Amino acid sequence: MSAAFSQRDLRDAFGLFATGVTVVTAVRPGGTPVGVTANSFTSVSLEPPLFLWCLAASSSAAPAFAHGAPFAVHILAHHQLDLALNFARRTHEKFEIERHWRNKPHPPHLEDALCRFDSRVHAVHAGGDHLIVVGEVLAIAAAHGTPLAFHAGRFGNFSADRGIPKVDIWEGLEDHWY
């Protein structure tokens, strides 16, 4: 194992951790909708209901994530690769939204996501070249389907191994996790 590594080496190594794919939507203070693709989503707490995700500190979407601001996280289904790619682009023209939507206080909702967390910003922390956005869950909309996954620079899907029993990692948490 080598102690010396490049940013590319680090990025490739981080990419070996398989993740789901989300699109986060919000509204800038001026009323313009923003959306970004993120695979840095993870649960933080059940009480209060918190999760986190990371956004490049240089992102033009950053002003939309001030303390208390509403936003939505959409966990994408396998058939939504086009949405993941669209919201990963560095452009302001990511939405096809009717004129009457602009300047509304709530973030856009994307259709057919596996799950949507309607949230508000609980906290924002600096984390190197990224911002760590902690969200508080206000409402959940969930469906069934196959998730879009990301691993080693490629999109794919995840299917559970039916031969392994379902595990509730939160059940008995106080007895087994330290």
Image (cartoon, helix red, strand yellow):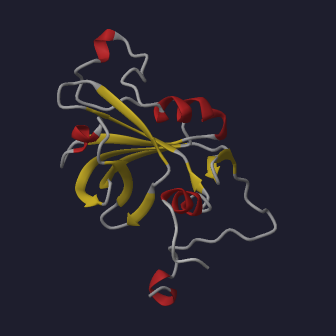
Whether 42 is drawn above or below 55: the answer is below
Q: Residue at x 32, y 40 (%)?
A: 59
Instruction: Report whether 114 appears left or right of 65.
Output: right
Q: Quadrant of residue 118?
A: top left
Residue 108: give x, y in percent of width and height: 37, 29
Whether 84 is drawn above or below 151: the answer is above
Residue 122: give x, y in percent of width and height: 23, 55
Instruction: Report whether 66 appears left or right of 61.
Output: left
**Which quarter of the rendered picture does the C terminus lie within?**
bottom left
Q: Residue at x 22, y 24 (%)?
A: 31
The count of marks equals 0
**Residue 112 visible in rendering:** no
* Residue in the foreground of this view, choosing between 118 and 25: 25
Whether 155 is drawn above or below 111: the answer is below
Of all residues, the one furthest to the right in this rendering is 163
* Residue in the foreground of this view, choosing between 47 and 154: 154
Residue 175: give x, y in percent of width and height: 49, 89
**Which quarter of the rendered picture does the N terminus lie within?**
bottom right
Of all residues, the one furthest to the top in this rendering is 99
Residue 26: give x, y in percent of width and height: 31, 35
**Residue 25 visible in rendering:** yes
Whether 173 is drawn above or below 156: the answer is below
